Image (spheres, rainbow, N blue to C red):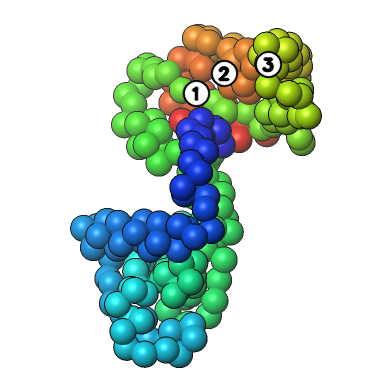
Amino acid sequence: MPPVAARPSAPDRAASSPRRRPALVAAAFVALVASASAQGASTEGPRVLADGTTPEAALTAPVVRTLVPLRASGLVVTDERRVLPDGRVARATTLADGTPVDLDALRREDHALGLRRRGGMTPALHERVARLAPGETLEVAFWLTEPEGARAGGGAMRAAIAGRAPGADVGAAVDTARRGAHAAAASRYAPGNAAFAARAAALGAELVATGDVWPFVIARVDASSARTLARDPGVDEAY
């Protein structure tokens, strides 16, 4: 799947202080409770506190309980989170009968199942293709499968500055590492991008763009070609 570009900012010194952390986590959890309430999740005091303490502790340990439907598999998972007295947030994810499950793993499996049922297309693209009239075309982005360990550029840049003292040479080292990672990614993805672009062109697709340092091809295709290319073994997801 396409990468998520957003990265969390580094915590400041106050947030990383052991003395402040429980209070800050508790404050963040209060915001989580408010957000969940606004979105329809249920909130209530915990049924059992981690240390079996007094009812007063329940005021600092609310439960946020959300039902998460998994469309392709038909499962509904209860995602329950609560803040512990020491500031840590505990999470439990279960099926309707109370069986513990790994929600993140189930989401990945559900996503893969949905893709297989839709022939490799996202729900939105699947609907758009179904509405296409004969002779009509649309632009489709095909995200291609990536080789094992393909995203090593960030590691290369971290390695470039490891152990270096702050100074001008750090910027130069990062620059060199970035150029090296860019060139390596381009050479790694170019063969697969070119091969898929050729297969798309052979089906009559109009090539719009081919990835440089990412594995994707964008092409204008009709409904039949969209379905064929989305099922191509080299495609991870069409959208």
Q: Amino acid at mark 2?
A: Val
Task: Tell me the distance, in whole angstroms, between the alpha carbons under discs 1 and 2.
Answer: 6 Å
Q: Secondary structure at mark 1?
A: strand
- Which residue is at 43% across, 26% downward? 223
Task: Tell me the crowding category of disc 2: few under 14, some 14 to 19, or many 20 or more residues within 10 angstroms, Cα based.
Answer: many
| Residue that numbered label 3 is attached to | 167
Any part of residue 146 in sight: yes
Q: Is residue 171 above or below residue 122?
A: above
Task: Tell me the distance, in whole angstroms, between the alpha carbons under discs 3 and 1.
Answer: 42 Å
Any part of residue 191 in sight: no
Q: Nearer the viewer, residue 213 or 160?
A: 160
Q: Amino acid at mark 1?
A: Ala
Q: Amino acid at mark 3?
A: Gly
175 horizontally vs 136: left or right: right
| Residue that numbered label 1 is attached to | 141
Q: Which mark is residue 217?
A: 2
* Quadrant into which the N terminus falls: top right
29 horizontally vs 147: left or right: left
Q: Nearer the viewer, residue 81 or 196?
A: 81
